[in-house]
């Protein structure tokens, strides 16, 4: 067997993946390991700032995101899975590029360099760039029968700032097709999940989430695969439709296809139990 | 005499004046948001695409128009700026390349700074609870955020079933995940408006 070199990345899990969605965190690490990606968790990372810092104070939001950049070891691309984290980390970097004073002030303050050329990438981009042959080689369980709506949510390529970077449209389909799954893209795949309104104004979010799930049912999908842990949560907790579909994290189906065995830990954390579907498709015993 | 007639006729048109127009606000928001909302020609693409428009008091295109007119009270007091989650559906579809979500961001900050009455105090409370968690732990601790938020807003039972489901599936972790060097985080909060007042 030819041994492939490990590729090194620093990894920013973010609050959702580290807590409410540990199943996404575990599965991404598992998948990365199989594929030969060394994801080194960023030492002592903090919240990217999220919409709340963005809403309340620009300096705070910049400082929170920038501290993470100052912790990143040089030369390793920084990988995030949460689209919002990715967005705020990149925004901070762009802001520091545009403002040398702010950049120097923060560097002096922490006594650490904040490299402006640090590459900040989404995990899917890592797969697309380095992973396609690794994916095919490591396929252990074909995802045949999985008919999924690729749910990107709003942030992965909508914000003008993200549009300057890699465009992700279609990548989730491409990657999961390689693993045997069949996309059903004819649904609300980019509609916003409701974000914080799910906590503050659930009655506004529920009908919208129902429309998303209903559109997936109408597209004859048997599940939804999300690129974002917050979307995953909102689609599960705010749906009141009669017919409900399992909502997977992208990394869960990926790790499953790559032969992960510790999935028993993941499914009980879902509100819509995906086990009946997976058993029916003979993907799990 | 080869000059074309048209050119002789060219002249400046008088400006339309709107009473009480606050030019300073428009200039300020333009600077903060870095987007040229004066280009808006009311096609309403933004309003048609916004998933949350039904819950807003004014659709996004009306916010642009009111800003152009300098209607400060209306834009700072509306619920639209709080309901907006920054999903950028509008910004990605605007034919004039206006980053509407950035305008909403700037208006929200401005409203807080100006001490304008907040149309959706529950949303402001929520953001504050998140920030309190970030200040204390450096990371978001959902359980304490939801707990304190529900206490504040008195919406105890409204979401009990969802909360219990999340607890049962260990989605609301009991103990927060923390930043070790928390001093570096608390320092960042010094600039935050709540403290500076
Ligand atoms: S989409 Fe753009 S141009 Fe059209 S109404 Fe909205 S802001 Fe104005
Ligand atoms: S960014 Fe705000 S205004 Fe624009 S579509 Fe999303 S919620 Fe609506």
Image: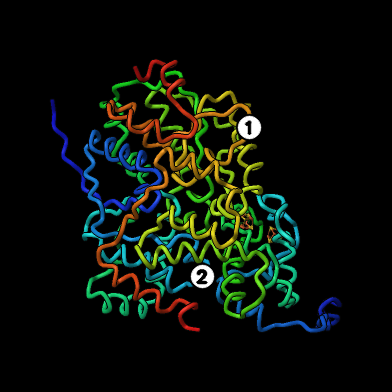
Q: Chain of mark 2?
A: A
Instruction: Report the side of A5 relative to A217 (left or right).
Output: left
Name the one closer to the observer, B14 or A171: A171
Res A241 label: 1
Query: Which chain does tag 1 point to?
Result: A
Instruction: Using the numbered discs, state the Cα–Cα distance from disc 1 to disc 2 in whole angstroms.
Output: 35 Å
- In this image, A145 relative to B155: left or right? left
Query: Closer to the N terminus: mark 1 or mark 2?
Result: 2
Q: Secondary structure at mark 1?
A: loop
Image quarter of the N terminus of chain A: top left
Q: What is the x, y in percent for residue A182?
A: 47, 24
Which residue: 47% across, 72% down? A58
Q: Position of residue A153 (x, y in %)?
A: 52, 45
**Residue holding disc 2:** A56
Q: Establish whether labels 1 and 2 are both on one chain.
A: yes
Look at the picture and state if B94 lies above or below A20: below
Callout 1 crowding tier (Cα within 10 Å): few <14, some 14–19, many ≥20: some
The relative height of residue A59 versus residue B54 in the rendered view (above or below) is: below
Quadrant location of the C terminus of chain A in the rendered image: top left
Q: Is residue B17 left or right of residue A40?
A: right
- Above or below residue A252? Residue A143 is above
**Disc 1 + disc 2, Cβ < 8 Å:** no
Residue, x 71% and y 58% (percent of image)?
B56
Q: Crowdedness of circle 2 by 10 Å Cα count: few (<14), some, many (20+)?
A: many
The reply to whether residue B11 is visible in this rendering is: no
């Amino acid at each position: 067997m030819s041994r492939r070199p490990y590729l090194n990345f620093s990894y920013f899990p973010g609050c959702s993946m580290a807590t409410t969605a540990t199943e996404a965190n575990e599965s991404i690490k598992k998948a990365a390991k199989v594929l030969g990606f060394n994801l080194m968790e960023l030492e002592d990372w903090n919240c990217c700032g999220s919409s709340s810092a963005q809403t309340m104070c620009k300096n705070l939001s910049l400082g929170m995101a920038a501290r993470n950049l100052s912790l990143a070891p040089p030369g390793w691309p920084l990988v995030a899975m949460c689209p919002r984290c990715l967005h705020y980390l990149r925004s901070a970097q762009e802001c520091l590029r545009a403002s040398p004073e702010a950049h120097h002030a923060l560097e002096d303050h922490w006594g650490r360099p904040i490299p402006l050329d640090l590459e900040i990438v989404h995990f899917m981009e890592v797969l697309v760039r380095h992973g396609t042959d690794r994916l095919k080689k490591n396929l252990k369980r074909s995802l045949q029968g999985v008919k999924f709506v690729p749910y990107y949510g709003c942030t992965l390529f909508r914000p003008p700032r993200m549009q300057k970077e890699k465009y992700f449209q279609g990548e989730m389909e491409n990657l999961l097709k390689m693993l045997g799954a069949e996309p059903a893209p004819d649904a609300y795949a980019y509609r916003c999940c409701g974000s914080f309104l799910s906590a503050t104004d659930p009655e506004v979010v529920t009908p919208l989430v129902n429309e998303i799930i209903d559109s997936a049912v109408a597209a004859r999908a048997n599940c939804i695969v999300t690129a974002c842990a917050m979307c995953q949560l909102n689609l599960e907790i705010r749906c009141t439709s009669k017919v409900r579909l399992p909502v997977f994290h992208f990394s869960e189906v990926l790790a499953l296809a790559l032969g992960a065995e510790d999935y028993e830990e993941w499914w009980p954390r879902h509100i819509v139990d995906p086990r009946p579907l997976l058993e029916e498709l003979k993907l799990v015993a | 005499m080869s000059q074309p007639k048209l050119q002789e006729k060219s002249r400046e048109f008088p400006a339309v004046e709107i009473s009480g127009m606050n030019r300073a606000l428009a200039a300020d928001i333009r600077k903060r948001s870095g987007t040229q909302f004066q280009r808006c020609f009311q096609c309403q693409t933004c309003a048609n695409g916004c998933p949350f428009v039904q819950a807003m008091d004014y659709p996004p295109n009306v916010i642009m128009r009111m800003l152009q007119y300098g209607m400060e009270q209306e834009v700072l007091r509306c619920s639209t700026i709080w309901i907006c989650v920054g999903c950028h559906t509008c910004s990605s579809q605007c034919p004039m390349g206006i980053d509407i979500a950035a305008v909403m961001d700037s208006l929200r900050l401005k409203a807080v700074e100006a001490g304008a009455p907040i149309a959706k105090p529950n949303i402001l409370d929520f953001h504050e609870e998140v920030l309190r968690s970030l200040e204390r732990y450096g990371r978001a601790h959902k359980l304490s955020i939801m707990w304190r938020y529900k206490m504040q807003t008195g919406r105890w039972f409204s979401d009990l079933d969802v909360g219990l489901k999340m607890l049962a599936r260990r989605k609301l972790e009991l103990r927060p995940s923390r930043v070790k060097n928390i001093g570096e985080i608390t320092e960042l909060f010094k600039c935050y408006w709540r403290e500076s007042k």
